Image (tube, rainbow, N blue to C red):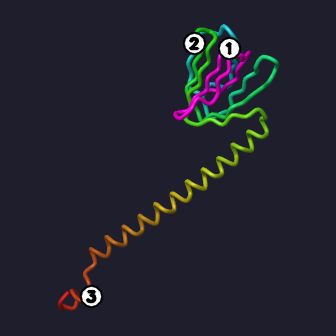
Amino acid sequence: MNLLITTPTEVLIRHDDVLAIQAEDESGAFGIWPRHADFVTALSISVVGWRRAGGRQSYCAVRGGLFTVTGGETVAIATREAIPGDDLAALEAIVRERLTADAEADRQAWAHAEQLRIQAIRQVIGFLRPSRADATGGPP
């Protein structure tokens, strides 16, 4: 079978010697063999695995995506983000590292947005509060 995994910016995986593919959608894990009926499903955030001619097993962590089988021989996965790997344990470490970095970036972005919100509230209060000179009846 042919396997094609793409992200919005690149063709990540292109193999033409795939014997079997394992993936996961909302209903659970499933497998694809040559001559499979045409098929379309939305993938969960998961790891897709495949076995190539010669027995080599490979993996790709995907952040969801669209999984299609066409003509019983072409499997295409379109996903927002994918991380390929040949060793499942190493792939897990890479994914954990990336998730930790993404969580930290999200935390920093939230903190920055909160600082901007507080600054905006202070400016609005400053405009709404009469100045001391106005409160005493003197010139502004």
Residue kind at label 1, given as amino acid type: Met
Q: Percent x, y for residue 69?
A: 59, 15
SS assignment at label 1: loop
SS assignment at label 3: helix
136 sits to left or right of 63: left
Q: Which residue is mark 1?
A: 1
91 sits to left or right of 128: right
Q: Which residue is mark 2?
A: 70
Query: Label 1 vs label 2: CA separation?
Result: 10 Å
Q: Percent x, y for residue 135?
A: 23, 87
Q: Which residues are magenta?
A: 1-25
Residue kind at label 3, given as amino acid type: Arg
Residue kind at label 2, given as amino acid type: Thr
Circle 2 Cα neighbour tier, 10 Å, few/some/many (<14 / 14–19 / ≥20): some
Closer to the observer: label 1 or label 2?
Answer: 1
Query: Label 3 vs label 1: CA separation?
Result: 78 Å
Q: Which residue is mark 3?
A: 132
